[in-house]
């Protein structure tokens, strides 16, 4: 029973770098679920993983750019990403307000989503000398 309960919990860190298609699919699904049209999803850009200080974790960010979305859609998309079970989380968010001459409430949203990769540092063999 205890092992089963742990296996049903979402992963806090992946033991490998995901194929970018996995991350892209999770983002696209969250975008669809939020009612955002495909034309409003301008770009999904995976970036290189970065080690978090001297920890055993690397963080793998992906930038997402949306244009012409409501704040409600943006929040629903972020919620969808965070609750996808893929270990993704919003790392940063930048909102650009509609222009003054624009009568709608459509925003530009730049978000960086990320996930953790468990990758311990490798100790050098014999102080780095073989």
Image: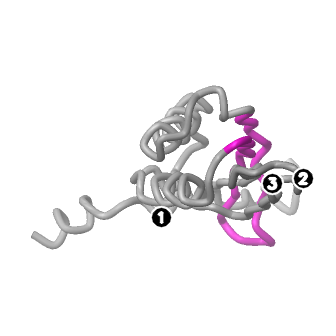
User: Residue pushed farthest left?
Assistant: 1
Q: Nearer the viewer, mark 1 or mark 2?
A: 1
Q: Residue 64 lies in magenta, yes or no? A: yes
Q: Which mark is residue 12?
A: 1
Mark before the other along the chain sequence, 2 or 3: 3
Image colouring:
one colour
Mark before the other along the chain sequence, 1 or 2: 1
Name the residue rendered at 45%, 53% in the picture. 80
Residue 15, compared with residue 4, is above or below; it is: above
Determine whether the residue tagged by mark 3 lies in a helix, strand or loop: loop
- Image x and y of residue 88, in percent: 54, 55
**Magenta stretch mostly in which secondary structure?**
strand
Within 10 angstroms of label 2, few (less than 14), some, or many (20 or more) residues? few
Residue 33, compared with residue 13, is above or below; it is: above
- Image x and y of residue 89, in percent: 57, 60
Q: Nearer the viewer, mark 3 or mark 1?
A: 3
Residue 39, compared with residue 105, is above or below; it is: above
Disc 2 target residue: 129
Q: Quadrant of residue 74?
A: bottom right
Disc 3 target residue: 98
Span highlighted in magenta in the image: 43-68
- Image x and y of residue 58, in percent: 70, 58
């Amino acid at each position: 029973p205890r092992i089963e309960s742990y296996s049903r919990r979402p992963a806090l860190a992946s033991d490998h770098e995901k194929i970018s298609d996995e991350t892209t699919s999770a983002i696209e699904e969250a975008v669809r679920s939020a009612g955002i049209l495909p034309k409003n999803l301008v770009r999904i850009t995976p970036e290189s993983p970065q080690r978090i200080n001297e920890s055993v974790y690397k963080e793998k960010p992906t930038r997402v750019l949306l244009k012409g979305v409501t704040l409600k859609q943006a929040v629903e998309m972020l919620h969808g990403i965070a609750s996808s079970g893929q270990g993704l989380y919003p790392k940063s968010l930048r909102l650009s307000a509609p222009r003054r001459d624009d009568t709608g409430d459509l925003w530009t949203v730049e978000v960086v989503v990320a996930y953790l990769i468990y990758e311990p540092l490798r100790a050098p063999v014999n102080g780095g000398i073989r």
